[in-house]
Image (cartoon, rainbow, N blue to C red):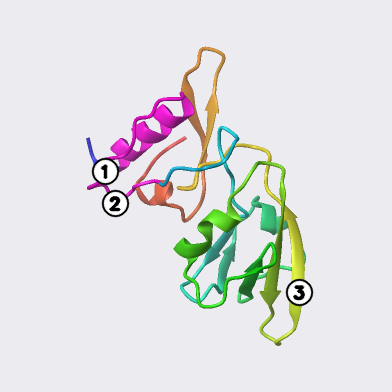
């Protein structure tokens, strides 16, 4: 199997409650969530290494906030300063229980600072840009593939 197929198998295994993980050699490794829920969801922001917002993902939690826009700089998450951090250093702060609220401090290009409260989506999405659904028989299918995500780049089709 290719790396993407191994990754998707690992995701399906996780959704089915299996402890199967992606091989260490895979470029699509996942980290284990310490959430008490079966899955965690993020806020729908794509950030560069300086934590500047490159994209507010359509349909993501942040897309519903008028206080977050492209070119804003993320400076805090739930009151924790993220200055000098990389996106991978703060991902555990951005993901959480579906339906929970996260408070994002952003510095606008003008220098003004805004606090945005966003509610994480209650639907299950996968961080590689796919929305999955389990049918009544327990089978999992791809419902949607996000534009510009890793799944689209790998030509995953719904």
Please give left or right for residue 40 compared with residue 61 in the image.
left
Residue 25, x across and y down, in percent: 22, 47
Which residues are drawn in magenta?
4-30
Instruction: Relative to 35, say whether 84 is above or below.
Output: below
The residue under label 2 is 27
Above or below — where is 6 with respect to 53?
A: above
**Comes first in the chain, label 3 or label 1:** 1
Position of residue 134 measured from the top left corner of the image (x, y, whole percent): 53, 23
Marks 2 and 1 close (CB-CB < 8 Å): yes
Is 78 inside the magenta-drawn segment? Answer: no
Provide the secondary structure element on which disc 1 rests: helix
Between 83 and 29, the residue placed more toward the observer is 83
- The local crowd at label 1, few if under 14, some if 14 to 19, many if 20 or more residues have their Cα within 10 Å, is some
Which residue corresponds to mark 1? Answer: 3
User: What is the x, y in percent for residue 100?
Assistant: 71, 46
Is the C-beta separation of discs 3 and 2 under 8 Å? no
């Amino acid at each position: 199997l290719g790396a993407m197929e191994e990754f998707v198998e690992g995701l399906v295994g996780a959704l089915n409650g299996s402890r199967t993980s992606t091989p260490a050699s895979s470029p699509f490794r996942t980290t284990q969530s310490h959430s008490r829920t079966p899955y965690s969801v993020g806020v729908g922001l794509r950030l560069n290494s300086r934590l500047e917002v490159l994209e507010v993902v359509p349909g993501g939690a942040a897309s519903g906030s008028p206080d977050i826009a492209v070119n804003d700089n993320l400076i805090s998450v739930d009151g924790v300063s993220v200055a000098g951090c990389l996106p991978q250093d703060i991902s555990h702060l951005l993901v959480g229980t579906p339906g929970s609220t996260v408070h994002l401090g952003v510095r606008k290009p003008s220098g003004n600072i805004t606090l945005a409260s966003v509610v994480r989506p209650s639907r299950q999405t996968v961080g590689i840009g796919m929305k999955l659904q389990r049918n009544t028989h327990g089978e999992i299918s791809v419902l949607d593939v996000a534009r510009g995500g890793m799944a689209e780049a790998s030509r995953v089709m719904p």
